[in-house]
Amino acid sequence: MQLSTRNRLPGTITEVVKGEAAAKVTLQVGDNHLVALITRESADELGLEPGKQATALVKATDVMILTEGGDVA
Amino acid sequence: MQLSTRNRLPGTITEVVKGEAAAKVTLQVGDNHLVALITRESADELGLEPGKQATALVKATDVMILTEGGDVA
Amino acid sequence: MQLSTRNRLPGTITEVVKGEAAAKVTLQVGDNHLVALITRESADELGLEPGKQATALVKATDVMILTEGGDVA
Amino acid sequence: MQLSTRNRLPGTITEVVKGEAAAKVTLQVGDNHLVALITRESADELGLEPGKQATALVKATDVMILTEGGDVA
Amino acid sequence: MQLSTRNRLPGTITEVVKGEAAAKVTLQVGDNHLVALITRESADELGLEPGKQATALVKATDVMILTEGGDVA
Amino acid sequence: MQLSTRNRLPGTITEVVKGEAAAKVTLQVGDNHLVALITRESADELGLEPGKQATALVKATDVMILTEGGDVA
């Protein structure tokens, strides 16, 4: 399989919070925390739970850039 | 300023490719490469270029989760 | 009306799961299932329920491509 | 700070609906209502509540265009 | 037609920049500028050009919230 | 591999248009056309070209719902 999605950040799941329709999944990726909001259906089917290895994927069109200096402008 | 965006990955810009309307920006974030597709206008206004410090931001709704085991299913 | 959104997949709603803030809507589109995570407000206002005809819309910037062969790379 | 995100719409929060994982935030921006679906975690950390000033941010890749005339085509 | 997309901002197109694959469209919406990055194909088919009335649409899952006070945190 | 992304639409690539930073990829999926705007880098690395089998992936948070009846409201 080859996937066009450019960004892959391997880490470990640290928390899963499930609502009726949505679920919030938190991962530790190196020194950073990452948070994903996915369907609860996905969280259930993949058996996501703290301690499990997982990779965060992000499409390049969804990445923004923040630089230092001046106000948010 | 406080921003609802959950995911912030600080790094260094390694490449900027500019088209007419869009620009591709690559960052080194720890051991990972990240790629952003933004407007060329943004890349110009922020003065993005290799060697510049920058932080990649990603909204939690745009993060997907990949786990090991079996086929892509 | 003309909409810039490129992708329109007509189908039939098969399930609606409502949380407080979000709702998950499943459609049958030809041989494929599609899942949408929208606001509960939208699901209520549009009266979404199983059996109703509906079209799934997706912006081109939100479509990823997966091809066969080798590992996820 | 300089942010690549092109679209910033300052307004006032009029409603916050919190689920377990997600939260819906409504703002009044000039004559328009805007709705955001974010993590509940963000809504809690930013202390979002009706009457609070806030700015809606949208990445350019997430904006679609609708024009008049003919059918949705 | 009823669309689940919550956010609709009517305005006037002020600029269109076309690349090979993508196009950047700028609108004036009240006191705000909005920028959309769409396919060039869409920009061509809708005949987008300065002076044309158009409505920007944004899905609620793509709206972020920025509040005043302290650092970007 | 298991991926949280809910929506997978297998088809055949019918067109690839490459700009400097972005690429537009069109697929035939059953009776529907799908268009993806991805990085040119992805299009090159995956060797996308007309006639190649490929699957379009879409995150559930990026799917909108359109129903019949009345105005766009």
Image (tube, coloured by chain):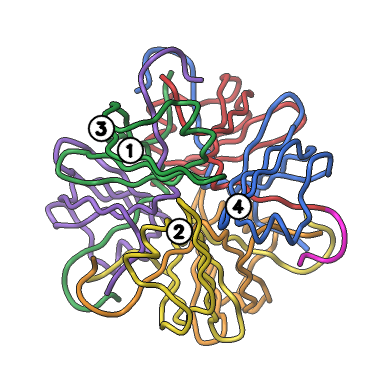
Chain colours: A red, B blue, C purple, D orange, E yellow, F green
Q: Quadrant of the N terminus of chain E?
A: bottom left
The residue tagged 1 is: F7
Q: Is residue F67 magenta?
A: no
**Amino acid of disc 1:** Asn
Q: Helix, strand or loop at disc 4?
A: strand
- At label 2, counting other C-alpha atoms closer than 10 Å, the crowd grade (few under 14, some 14-19, many 20 or more) is many
Residue occupying image coordinates x 46% and y 84% = E51
Chain ID of residue with mark 3: F
The residue tagged 3 is: F12
> In the figure, residue F64 lies in which quadrant?
bottom left
- State yes or no: discs 1 and 3 in contact (Cβ < 8 Å): no
> In the figure, residue E10 lies in which quadrant?
bottom left
Residue occupying image coordinates x 40% and y 44% = F17
Q: Tell me which segment is drawn in magenta.
A: A68-73
Q: Is residue A69 magenta?
A: yes
Is A73 on the left-hand or right-hand side of A19? Answer: right
Image x and y of residue C5, in percent? 35, 59
Q: Image height check: is C19 above or below B10?
A: below
- Picture disc at residue B38: 4
**Amino acid of disc 3:** Thr
